[in-house]
Amino acid sequence: MAQPAPEDEDVLTSYFPNPPPFYKHFTPKNLAALAQFQSAQDTAPDTPLTTAQLLQLPTELRYLVPPAPPSPSAEYSVFGKKTTVNALDDYPEAMQAIRTRLQTHPVTGEVVLDWSYEQLYPSTTSWSSLDRQAYLFRFLRSIVLSYVELLGVMAQDPTSAAKDEKLKDVLTLALNMHALVNEYRPHQARETLIREMERQVERKKGEVEGVRRMGERVREVLAGFERGGGEGRVEVDGVGTEVGDEERRTQRQREMWGVMDEVLGH
């Protein structure tokens, strides 16, 4: 029988883990105290503190100092799969693997397509300095045009060398689009998280509204008990009716069980 996973692993790989307990230290008072300490040490807010300076801070202020960024070889979990920071920059290696597979046929060993990847958009370190949407539209139109030209070449001479050139163009354009789309992944993750948090907020609001309605229902029933509390009378559909003690007790029990069913969701 397989052993269950340790609880700490479940916390690390859960879809939305609980916030760390030290989030309570992120208060305006502590932030002001940290800024005052950095000013006294002649340290800029974006300059990391030294080990000696960190040891001078109270425990609750040390949590406010961001840790050093992870090393490129550090591992982290994505949907239960281990990966590294370097894995985000291995696109050239992936293109080289595609080139290697195209160069050798798995059966005959012949060269299938002598192709190499070429980046058709400028490299940039700033997200806003490159209009990725415009490049995606350009590549898409170029792919459609190259495909139409490829059909024309295939119709005239399927063995023509121009066919391979058009295939190379289509492959290069498609992989450039793939690379640009991959750069939207952080934004996709952020928007997905925002939508999930919005759904959680709406669900919590619905639960609060349900509790409020149930509270009103309970108060109405209790008020009905109070109005029908006279001797020999019971409240039935808002109208006081003369009944015996046994009938009055039975009616109140029915109402109590009805309210309990509503509260418990039966």
Image (tube, rainbow, N blue to C red):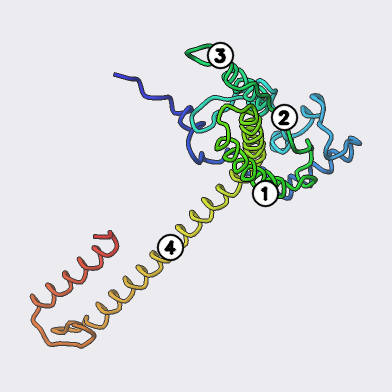
| Residue 117, image x, y percentages | 68, 27
| Residue placed under numbered mark 4 in the picture | 206
Circle 3 or circle 2, nearest the eye: 3
- The amino acid pointed to by label 3 is Glu
x 66%, y 20%: residue: 73
- Disc 2 and disc 1 in contact, CB within 8 angstroms: no
Q: What is the distance, in whole Å, between disc 1 and disc 3 at their CAs? A: 35 Å
Nearer to the camera, 266 or 102: 102
| Residue placed under numbered mark 3 in the picture | 110
- Element marked by disc 4: helix
- Residue 66 as seen in the image, left or right of residue 212: right
Label whose residue precedes the other's in the sequence (2 or 1): 2
Numbered mark located on residue 137 in the image: 1
Q: What is the distance, in whole Å, between disc 3 and disc 4 at their CAs? A: 64 Å
Image quadrant occupied by the N terminus? top left
Circle 3 or circle 4, nearest the eye: 3
- Element marked by disc 2: loop
- Disc 3 and disc 2 in contact, CB within 8 angstroms: no
Label whose residue precedes the other's in the sequence (3 or 4): 3
Q: Is residue 74 above or below residue 175?
A: above
| Residue placed under numbered mark 2 in the picture | 118
- The amino acid pointed to by label 2 is Glu
Circle 4 or circle 1, nearest the eye: 1
Circle 1 or circle 3, nearest the eye: 3
x 66%, y 47%: residue: 141
- Element marked by disc 1: helix
- The amino acid pointed to by label 1 is Phe
Q: How many residues crowd mark 3 within 10 Å: few (<14), some (14–19), many (20+)? A: few
Label whose residue precedes the other's in the sequence (2 or 4): 2
